[in-house]
Amino acid sequence: MKKTPLRMCVGCRAMKEKRQLIRVVKTADHGGELDFTGKKPGRGAYICNDADCLKKAKKSKSLERALNVTLSEDVYRRLEEEIQHGQ
């Protein structure tokens, strides 16, 4: 039996399966982009597919701290759209 990889959400700090989370990757130009495949190179941080987790992460800037970058409003807007689309 194969183990399912677990990752921690930066919003609620809960351990969940990697497939249940959205990955945000630090890009070479010190920005961020969404990674739906989970295979893009670079430092990544995970967030739940939940609006409350995104609000917590945005308020505490935990997503930015995890990636060591300043994320633009465009990245947060795309995350909100993806969460709304997923629910």
Image: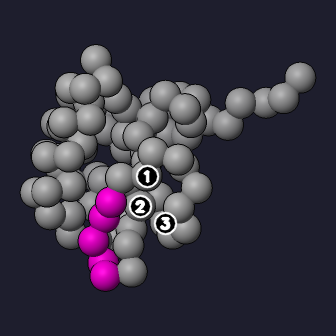
Nearer to me, 62 or 22: 22
Q: Is residue 69 rendered to the left or right of residue 66?
A: left
Quick check: is 30 in the magenta stretch? yes
Quick check: is 42 in the magenta stretch? no
At x 33% / y 60%, what residue is drawn? 33
- Residue type at mark 3 is Arg
Label 2: element kind: strand
Q: Earlier in the sequence, mark 3 or mark 2?
A: 2
At x 84% / y 29%, what residue is drawn? 2
Category of crowding for the residue at label 1, using alpha-carbon neighbours closer than 10 angstroms: few (below 14), some (14–19), many (at least 20): some
Q: Which mark is residue 25?
A: 2
Q: Which mark is residue 35?
A: 1
Q: Quadrant of residue 18?
A: top right
Residue highlighted by disc 3: 43
Which of the two discs, 1 and 3, sits closer to the camera? 1
Question: How far apart are labels 2 and 1 at the CA level?
Answer: 6 Å
Residue 23, given in percent of the width and then of the height, sits at 43, 48
Q: Is residue 65 above or below residue 13?
A: below
